[in-house]
Amino acid sequence: MGGIEENGKRIIIGLGSGRCGTMSLAKLINAQTNSVCFHELNPSGMSWCGAEYTVLSLLRDFTAIIEGEERAITADLVSPDRLSIMPRLLELQNVDVLGDVASYYLPYVELVISRAPAARFPCMRRDKKETIDSFVNKLSELPNEKPRNPWACLEDRRWRHDPIWDRCFPKTSKVNGEDLAEYIGEYYDEYYREAEIVEREHRENFRIFDTNDLNSNEGRSEILNFCLPDADHKNFHVHKNKRKSH
């Protein structure tokens, strides 16, 4: 898989804790010439640990498509909106860049690099309080229902659980209470502590960007220069980082 970076061909795996601009990152990459970037392509097949074969399957599909083989890919049919980018994949005459953006790839960075040494990993980081507030709103959006908490063990009935997404987040034993914000804060700290370690060890492949970089021409250029150093870029506004939670 290591040779596909020739002539501007590349795999991109975007990351971030969630509620941090990952969808906007996918839109920015997807807007580039001959580029296709999904957002959370196959959460049903993923988990925070033990999903190595799913990741390897993704890399196999991405590599085959970039090399001009049949454009067949494993996509999650549970949420059809995630397939909105599929027509672009099928219609482009050439696909030189393929990517997916999701929080759950962080434990698999080493695996991806071992198979695709030129892969790039832009990782978005939003202000901690803004991230917590946005997560709390998202996970508490159903009225008269318990909040959903993917970081609590499934046996903890104080929380609502999701059979797909709960597997895609790490569980924490450091928090055991009814304050959802505390769970999110612990997750945030652990996520970016690990991301910083990976960035130090794989600086050429992995880079942490502030979510506000998506709001400026200079910031978007920096992200694109990292992701696609050998390509011309289309720089346009894709994200509005609201100070109020959403």
Image: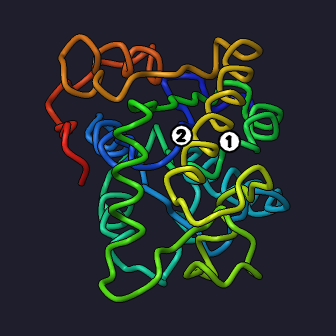
Mark 1 nearby-residue class (10 Å; few <14, some 14–19, many ≥20)? many
Vertical position of residue 192 compared to residue 174: above or below: above
Q: Is residue 8 left or right of residue 33?
A: right
Vertical position of residue 151 compared to residue 192: above or below: below
Of 117 and 24, the residue lying toward us: 24
Residue for point 47% across, 82% down: 146
The image shows residue 25 at horizontal and vertical percentages of: 35, 39
Of 82 and 143, the residue lying toward us: 143
Under mark 2, the amino acid is: Leu
The image shows residue 169 at horizontal and vertical percentages of: 65, 59
The image shows residue 110 at horizontal and vertical percentages of: 80, 34
Farthest bottom residue in view: 144
SS assignment at label 2: strand
Under mark 1, the amino acid is: Leu
Q: Is residue 85 left or right of residue 162?
A: left
Residue for point 62% across, 75% down: 44
Mark 2 lies on residue? 15
Mark 1 lies on residue? 106
Q: In which quarter of the image is residue 69?
A: bottom right
Q: Marks 1 and 2, Cα distance to the nearest angstrom?
A: 7 Å
Mark 2 nearby-residue class (10 Å; few <14, some 14–19, many ≥20)? many
Q: How does the figure colour the protein chain or chains?
A: rainbow
Q: Which image quarter is the C terminus in? A: bottom left
Q: In which quarter of the image is residue 213?
A: top left
Vertical position of residue 203 compared to residue 146: above or below: above
Residue for point 60% across, 26% down: 5
Of 42 and 93, the residue lying toward us: 42
Asked whether disc 1 touches disc 2, contact meaning CB atoms under 8 Å apart, the reply is yes
The image shows residue 157 at horizontal and vertical percentages of: 66, 84
Vertical position of residue 10 compared to residue 102: above or below: above
SS assignment at label 1: helix
